[in-house]
Amino acid sequence: MNLKKLKRLLENDNHDYREKLKLLMSDPIFTPRFELSLKEQRNLAFTRLQKLFRSGMVDLHDFETDHRRIFALHDICGLIDGSLATKLTVQLNLFSGTVLKFGNRERWQRLREQANRLEAVGCFALTELGYGNNAVAMETEAVYNHSLKCFVINTPSTLAQKYWITNGYCHAHWAVVFAQLKVKGQSQGVHGFLVRIRNEDLSPVEGVTIQDMGMKMGLNGVDNARLWFEQVMVPRDNLLDAFSTIDDEGNFHSKVEGKRNRFLKMADQLLSGRLCIASMMMAATKMSLLIALRYSQKRKAVGTDGESSWPLLNFELQRRALIPLLARTYALSFALNRAKNEFSFVENSREQIINCCAMKALVTWHAEHTVSVCRERCGGQGYLAANMFAEFLAGAHAGETAEGDNSVLMQKVAKELLSGISSVDLLRMKSKQYIGFKASKLTKTEEVLRLLHKREDILKAHLALKMQKASRGGKEEGFRVWMMEESETVQGLAKAYGEHFALQSFLNILQEGGDDPVLAKLAQLFAFQCLEDNLTLFWEQGLITRSLAKSVHMQVSKLSAELVPYVSYLLDGFNIPEYLIHAPIARDFIVFNQCQNDNQGETYQFSAGKGTMPEILSRPQLSYSI
Amino acid sequence: MNLKKLKRLLENDNHDYREKLKLLMSDPIFTPRFELSLKEQRNLAFTRLQKLFRSGMVDLHDFETDHRRIFALHDICGLIDGSLATKLTVQLNLFSGTVLKFGNRERWQRLREQANRLEAVGCFALTELGYGNNAVAMETEAVYNHSLKCFVINTPSTLAQKYWITNGYCHAHWAVVFAQLKVKGQSQGVHGFLVRIRNEDLSPVEGVTIQDMGMKMGLNGVDNARLWFEQVMVPRDNLLDAFSTIDDEGNFHSKVEGKRNRFLKMADQLLSGRLCIASMMMAATKMSLLIALRYSQKRKAVGTDGESSWPLLNFELQRRALIPLLARTYALSFALNRAKNEFSFVENSREQIINCCAMKALVTWHAEHTVSVCRERCGGQGYLAANMFAEFLAGAHAGETAEGDNSVLMQKVAKELLSGISSVDLLRMKSKQYIGFKASKLTKTEEVLRLLHKREDILKAHLALKMQKASRGGKEEGFRVWMMEESETVQGLAKAYGEHFALQSFLNILQEGGDDPVLAKLAQLFAFQCLEDNLTLFWEQGLITRSLAKSVHMQVSKLSAELVPYVSYLLDGFNIPEYLIHAPIARDFIVFNQCQNDNQGETYQFSAGKGTMPEILSRPQLSYSI
């Protein structure tokens, strides 16, 4: 397959838009900087965000015309700066997206337009300190006062403070605040309210306390805040009223029955948010692999002649560690693209919801694992901030537990998969019709696909029957079995679903995109890697013979070795332009390390000649004393 | 077992000394700080180092009386600050230890004493940019000039710059510089030279160029430098001359034959260095588990009643993730203690060398994995710098590839294991006498131990026979098979050895320390976890039946659940005093998050009342503008 076609396949959509975005990122403001204070990091992330919005390439209304443009934007930002991408996703998806979806269209037109130009900065105040894992039980209250025609928003306890609020500590004027609505003494569940939290001069409005969450593992350009509301009054119109309203007589009306459903409805942007997170993480994963593999092609170690003559990629240790990750990156990219294509801004089917959750979890776990392995396989060089793994690793960790802890999302996936089982299915499971398949050979990737499907079916059947039995003991017993006995199966089922989905997506691409021997081999490697990682399960279920199992390891090694000559081609497929690759070990690390190049670990001097940095970011003179 | 006994078992040695060190660390200078510039971080690490040396509790000569005191010192520092521990280990073990071992005893007495009081700061200039993985081939030259009676030290190329030199950028006066010694035009291999690199006023001496390596993934209190030497002259006496000398006629003499052997001899402190690294990493692992498990005991999520009523540790997901890590931490601690006990400052047997290498690799990998899982299982809270995982994770990454990339050390372990095989052994292997064992039940931990031993034997036999066959094709063919075909077996064998050693060490402790049902259960969990992680291998080798394999998963889950009531006891066993636990989630995270406690993510205000921070570290006023 020619390279252009490969790039387009992997990118999926909005090719011209992506090129323009990348070109924008060639501006020196987007060159990575490292030795910055917290304040400078936040200012830098915001300056980058401004640059992005001022380019005219960010538009909230893409959600309604082509939501994939929004994800494409996250892809490109994820290549460059996780802090920028995080501030972007909160402004564009969580804040503006929620206003677009649930705010009165005419009433909030001006704010929407301001937000769309970043003249108004917003945040999304959902999570509370005590209820990150149980948001529906949040404590923050919005009590409707009919005589004043306003809501009084209050933080009743320490556990009720809004926590982790991105854009909150430095930049946000507005917040979508989620709170338990109380009307005429009655609780109506969680609703969203547009609350002004800062005045024009950026001082907090009266009654709002904003505190800094300080240093984090990474993404320190993101200004996370803790927020308290002390009897803050907001007009009746500020209720996001797409499904719930309060009439002139002060009566509450809602199109949605039940508090839990209202909460789920309001938190809807978290679903696209998961695709946003997966998009940025996938970009960081690609960049990590590009950096590590390029270094592995150049960096020399002791070869057969006893000299430093062998590139690292000659060694099985290096190939075996990195090439399967490249295969999985391709597979998950195709799967994520499918989830993006099928996603809808308006309404999503159970399958689409499952795919968003499964992909967010698998992609962010894969990101963490990949970056971690890349770092280790690059040794000390991988430890330097300039070589980018540090920030990517921290970003991946954030991705794993933000907008739904991965393991909890996997529980959701498993639960939804079970709820799709009909009573006929259940009968069939009971008669064990799912069992009784044994792979005799695994020459074709399709045969592995079938095996992955079997694994999913078996786990589903096991879990469905267990839960059916448990349900006889009542709801509590069901909860207990799910949470205290079957959590390995729950996680395993969701993973099995996700990997089957990924391999299927890869094979679809091969079928539609025309046969390509290198991609076919890559798909096969991914397939065997899924087998290898879970070989015990296939064995325990009697799905595979011992001799076949042994061949799986050999296949992974063999395919990894065979793909070495195509590494550059596959990395080029990521379509990352040279001018966005800043890591010295992905470029000429010897030049970077020349004595005359006293860069103090920064890359901006190395890739110099593009103008100077803004004053706020200039580096203090170094002087040390002991 | 009473708690006191447990603590002493786990600590192994120097209990009073450890208590005094911990008490020293209660000084507010050791309270974690987060929002600091690179310069402040380096000054802080050095100030802490000074405090430590001035306490009179650091003594180089412990190497000769009780080397375990040196490791104990690393244990305690590792609990607190990886940067401090790293600067310490370079000053004490690599620099001073090398001077002690190889420097002329009388001639360098003054420097040794100064270094022992930190009045002279040293660094260890071994690694070069191009030869981190092949140090014996380093390029830096020391050419002996007989008329001047001095060595001329020179950095001939960019790849020859000394790289990663801890203490180099800010603080070091002296360096042990490793260079290819040339006498009368002849190369005599790598030797060490004492080179003054800074003047009293800390300016670099003429001919020495020192550059900053800048920001890293973590350990940013460590001032890593790049060093160049331009015809720097050092007197003849500065050759570390324990085995090689130059006589008055300018002739070279050495007690050690062969360049490679001379290099290995000179780099001897790397061996104790590995135990130092393992010690600090083990401490960080314990602290991480303590933080994560305490939080898991307190933090609530949705329980059977639908309220936030269940502590996280009620959930199988949390137990299954964390409790086996606790078991492995105990096992590796006992194994590391054994390696420390058996280590000798003077001369080490093959087995001792193997144990140092295997333990360094297994402990640092375990540290990275543990911290990473702890971070994830603590969700967003785990992401805050104040909760310590960020720096521990970065420290573990450094540990994995410093002083020998773990995978390379594992190669060394495997190589040494093979070299211990006699021809009789090899004959026995050929007749497959090692094969043919099958576990029928696994009720006792000793049975698992036997299985782990079998795994080691089988891998060893497989590899030995492969290598014997390959050796017929010549040295190059042997290298090729080792590096390009059998790397999975090589790594697997070393891991099998290490895990068997760890379980054996654990069982020895149980046998000697008196039976304790909780510890016995913990050992069993570790044993089953080793099985579970490698189940495929046991199956493929026919060592275990399918039904037994299934029981392994159940055992791990069951034992994890059964150990939950003993978590506090097992954490208390770490003997970490409350005053050294700074992470808010391991204390009262609700108090930490009170509105009136505007701590900006720092813990020092939270654990206040212990005096103020030094001026250099005071925090700038915050003011943001957009």
Image (cartoon, coloured by chain):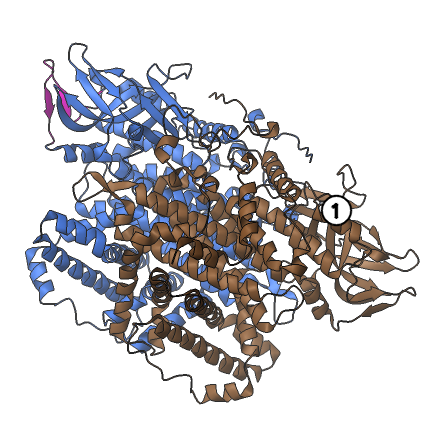
Chain colours: A blue, B brown
Horizontal and vertical percent position of residue A191: 20, 27
Image quadrant containing the N terminus of chain A: bottom left
Image quadrant containing the C terminus of chain A: top right
Residue density around tag 1, few if under 14, some if 14–19, many if 20 or more, within 10 Å: some
Q: Where are the magenta residues, as a range?
A: A239-256
Instruction: Based on the picture, tell me whether residue A222 belongs to the magenta stretch.
Output: no
> Is B303 above or below relative to A115?
below
Horizontal side, residue A12 vs residue A596: left or right: left
**Residue situated in front as seen by the camera: B4 or A347:** B4
Horizontal side, residue A382 vs residue A521: left or right: right
Instruction: Based on the picture, tell me whether residue A242 belongs to the magenta stretch.
Output: yes
**Residue situated in front as seen by the camera: B12 or A550:** B12
Q: Residue at x 48, y 41 (%)?
A: B580
Horizontal side, residue A621 vs residue A449: left or right: right
Q: Secondary structure at mark 1?
A: helix
Q: Residue at x 41, y 17 (%)?
A: A202
Can the viewer see residue A378 in this picture?
Answer: no
Query: What residue is pinned by disc 1?
Result: B114
Q: Residue at x 65, y 55 (%)?
A: B93
Quarter of the figure with residue B276: bottom right
Q: Residue at x 40, y 45 (%)?
A: B291
